[in-house]
Amino acid sequence: MEQVNVTFLPGGVTVQVERGTTLLEAAIRAGLHPDAPCAGRGTCGKCRVRAEGREVLACQTAADRDMTVTLPEARRERILTAGVTAQAEPDGRHRYVLAFDIGTTTVVAYLLDGITGKALSQASALNPQTQFGADVISRIQLVMEQGPDTLSSCIREGLAALTREAAQRAGIGPEDITLAAVVGNTAMHHLMLGIDPAPLTTPPYMPRVFEALELPAARLLPIAAEGTVRVLPNIAGFVGADTVGCMLATRFDRLEDLTLMIDIGTNGEIVLGDRRRRLACSTAAGPAFEGARISCGMRGAVGAVDRVWLEDGQVRWHVIGGREAVGLCGSGLLDLTAALLDSGVLDETGRMLCGSAYRLGDTGVVLTQKDVREVQLAKAAIRAGIELMTEKLGAAVNSIRSVYLAGAFGNFLDPVSACRIGMLPPVLLDRVRGIGNAAGEGAKLAALSGAEFDYSKRLAAETEFLELASLPQFQDCYVDCLGFEEEEE
Ligand code: FES
C-alpha cells in the first residue's frame, strides 16, 4: 500500500500513513490527541482543520497525497485540581505514593510524600481517550466494535506518561513510587483494568466489578515492580469510584445536616444524605456542559466564553485568556441561557424569540434553538434527580442545608444562573459551594492510608443506589423540569 506523509502545524510533526487514511487517524497516530467528540462519525464538527488551504473535517478527509494540515490553535485546558478535603493522616508505609483521578475528559496525577502527606508534584492532561469520543457511551460503542484493548492501552499509556512526568517534577524515579490509588467513573475504571464496560449500556446498567481492588502494579503502571495499585469501589453503573472519592473527601457519612453533592460532568452524579442515610443516583445530563452537542460548545480553554451577564439590558461576556471568543464552555452556556431568559430572548418554554439562533455581539459564537433544547434536557435531568431523591428520603428540598458542587464545571458555574435556569432549586442558592476536585482528594486519602481505603469500602457499601428511571414518577417529574419558569427563592 502506498504511503503518504502528513505534516501537522503548528509543531511540524510528520507522520507516515497509508494513502486513504483519514486526517483524524493520522493526527491520532502522530500522538496529537485531536478533539473528536463523535469519534469520527462526522456529526460533531469539532475536528475541523485546514488542509491544503481548505477547512475540512479531519475525520471525513482522506490523506490522498503528501499533505500539510494546520490544527486549530492548541487549547490550554483549564483543569481544576485544587480541592477541599479532610486532612489525611498518612500511615507512613510507603515513601512515595501517587493518586489518580481519571475523568472522562481530564486525568490528574498527584505525587505525595507517603510519610508526611505533603504534595510533591502533580501532572494533568486530557484523557487521551477523548480522541475516540467525548462521552463514555461513544467510547463503549467503540469497545463493542473493536474490543477493549485500544482504549485500555490508550488510558494506561496516558497514566504512564503522567506517572513519569509527576516523578520527574519531584526529582525521583517512577520506580521509587510503591503505591498508587485510582478513582474514576465506572467506564474509566473498567477500561483502565481492561474490563469490557459493555454491561454499562444495557439494563440493569451495572458494572462488572463493584468491589475495591488491590492489584500488583506491574501490568498497570510503571511504578516499582513490587508496587500496588488501590482501586476504589464502584456503587453502580454510572456511580463510580470517583463519587466514592468525593464522599471520602467530604466525610459524607459523618455530616449532621442533610447535604446534596452533585458532580456534573459527562454525567451528573448526585448524592443526598447525612450521617443517617445516603442515596446516590446518576442522571443522564449528557455532555452538553462539556461542550459536546452544542454548536459552539467547547471545553473551558483559551477562547471560551466562560461568563455572560446583563448590564443595563445589554449582554456582556468574558473570554478565557482575553482573546477572541471562539466558543462557549459549560459555565458560559449556563450564563448565556440565564441572560437570554432575563432579557426576554427566550421564553419560559425555551423558545427563542429572535429566530433560530442568537449571536453573541459580533463574535462568531451563536446559541441555537437546538442548543437551548440540549441545555433543557441536561438541566432537567439534574433537577429531576434532586427532586426524586429528596422525595425518596421523605424530605423537603428546603431542608437541604448544603449543596456541594464537585468537579471543574461545578466549581466554575455561577449558582445564580444554575438556579435561574432551574437546574438547581432557587431556594438552595445561598447554600451552594464548590468543593473542587473532591474525587482527586479522595484518591489522595486512599493513597496515603490503608484505613482511608477501607473507609471508602464502607462508604460504598452503605450508600443506597437509586435507579431514577425505574421510579414510576420519573417521566412526569423530568418533563416538569424541562421548562424555564421563574421560581420563588
Ligand atoms: S465530525 Fe469529525 S470527529 Fe466529529
Image (tube, rainbow, N blue to C red):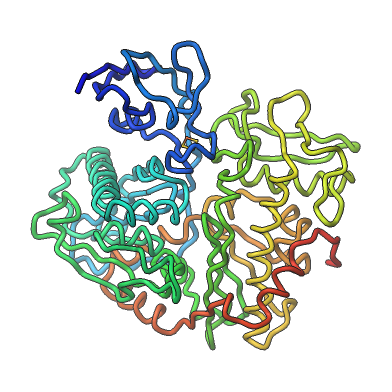
- Which residue is farthest front? 1
- Which residue is farthest left? 225
Q: Residue at x 67, y 70 (%)?
A: 384
In front: 58, or 290? 58
In front: 163, or 468? 468
In front: 441, or 308? 308
Q: Please count the marks in the image.
A: 0
Residue 436 in the figure: left or right of residue 121: right
Residue 243, by quadrant, is: bottom left
Q: Residue at x 59, y 65 (%)?
A: 404
Residue 33, by quadrant, is: top left
Q: Quadrant of the N terminus?
A: top left
Q: In the rendered image of this protein, does residue 432 appear above or below residue 452? A: above
The percent coordinates of residue 121 (x first, y second) are: 32, 45
Q: In the rendered image of this protein, does residue 296 appear above or below residue 394? A: above
The percent coordinates of residue 453 (x first, y second) are: 30, 72
Q: Residue at x 68, y 81 (%)?
A: 473
Q: Residue at x 42, y 63 (%)?
A: 242
The percent coordinates of residue 292 (x first, y second) are: 56, 45
Q: In the rendered image of this protein, does residue 139 appear above or below residue 447? A: above
Q: Quadrant of the C terminus?
A: bottom right
Residue 269 in the figure: left or right of residue 104: right
The percent coordinates of residue 302 (x first, y second) are: 55, 31
Residue 212, by quadrant, is: bottom left
In front: 127, or 82? 127
